[in-house]
Amino acid sequence: MAAVVVVGSFNVDHVWTLPRHPRSGETLAARYATGPGGKGFNQATAAARAGADTAFVCALGEDAGGELARRLAAADGIALHAAQSSQPTGTAGIYVDAAGNNTIAFGAGANADLDAAFIDRHAAELASARVVLAQMETPPAAILSTFRHARRGDALTVLNPAPADAELSGALLALADVVTPNESEFCAQLSVHCSTRLEGTGLVEMEDAELHSHCRRLCPHGTVVVTLGAAGCFVSHADAARHGDDRAHYRVPAAPARVVDTTGAGDAFNGALAASLARRAGSFADSIRFAASYAAASTENAGAASSMPRLTP
């Protein structure tokens, strides 16, 4: 059985690299490339390349994209459990500017067909894992079932609430031991669940005690890790669940990097965090620092899943 089980999306990415992002109605010349992506597959690839025995549960179309997923999973030693869909494998369109910043639009395709019934077939593997990691590019019912099975065992549940407009129920948040939003995702969920409106750009300058208070309101029982891009991340624990940390809240700076492309950096962070937590060695802060370093290294390569550094032979 795998130490890390990732449940989520696989996409075929179509990437355009250009000097700046197009304005409305504007056409710009760009360099084009295609490759594997999807938040779930990116995170599974990161977990595997960061040293964890990893399984990936997803839905794929009966097409070239599905074959690509199977081939790449096998190459990285990822145990792939894929529901077959009559829809095409998911796709994403990505624009990357000269500074490495990106904007993304995705078409769910087969990802929308990952359902609770297929998740139930893998209940034993979810319950036996050390860490179960999921995002929200697949149906919420499937993710809710995922965490319910994980909680029947000894797995630590990690929820990456992306994209920002994802529908997170209170029941799903209650099943998450660790929640890892970026700035926009954190503000979006705080608005929905706590009726509090914040600007994501203001989180970097916000006093730690105030940010910790907001985190406790969103997820009273567990840990919230707010990723802040170049400013690193903020960690907020519930007092009863600090995972080996002495402090209830703290910041960890980003590791230095020669940035080429930030696509998948958040996924690199989540996958590496899951891999480190699965080792159950050291404090939570140690795992955060490892994840931050891994994410920084991923930005020095172009692409999404293909940018994940290999830390294993």
Image: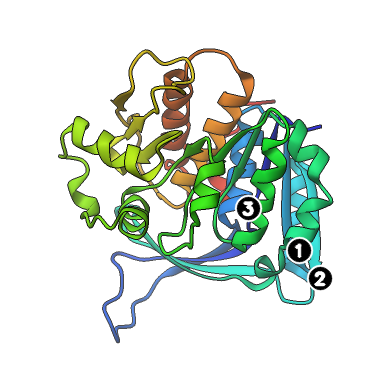
Labelled pair 2, 1 in contact (Cβ < 8 Å): yes
Per the image, label 1 sits on a secondary structure element best described as helix
Q: Is residue 195 above or below residue 122?
A: below
Q: Which residue was labeled with disc 3?
A: 144
Residue 208 in sight in this render:
yes
Q: Which residue was labeled with disc 2?
A: 62
Residue 159 in sight in this render:
no
Which amino acid type is shown beneath numbered disc 1? Gly
Which amino acid type is shown beneath numbered disc 2? Glu
Horizontal side, residue 156 vs residue 161: left or right? right
Q: Residues within 10 Å of mark 3 (few under 14, many from 20)?
A: many
Tell me the quadrant of the picture where the N terminus can be found: top right
Query: Marks 2 and 1, how far apart in space?
Result: 6 Å
Which amino acid type is shown beneath numbered disc 3? Leu
Quarter location, residue 64: bottom right
Query: Marks 2 and 3, how far apart in space?
Result: 26 Å
* Residue at the (72%, 46%) spot, across then down: 56
Horizontal side, residue 31 vs residue 176: left or right? left
Check residue 66 in the rendering and tell me which mark sits there, or answer none. Answer: 1
* Residue at the (48%, 32%) spot, across then down: 294
Nearest the eye: 298 or 238: 238
Check residue 162 in the rendering and tell me which mark sits there, or answer none. Answer: none
Q: Is residue 130 above or below residue 16?
A: above
Q: Is residue 31 above or below residue 265?
A: below
Query: Marks 3 and 1, how far apart in space?
Result: 24 Å
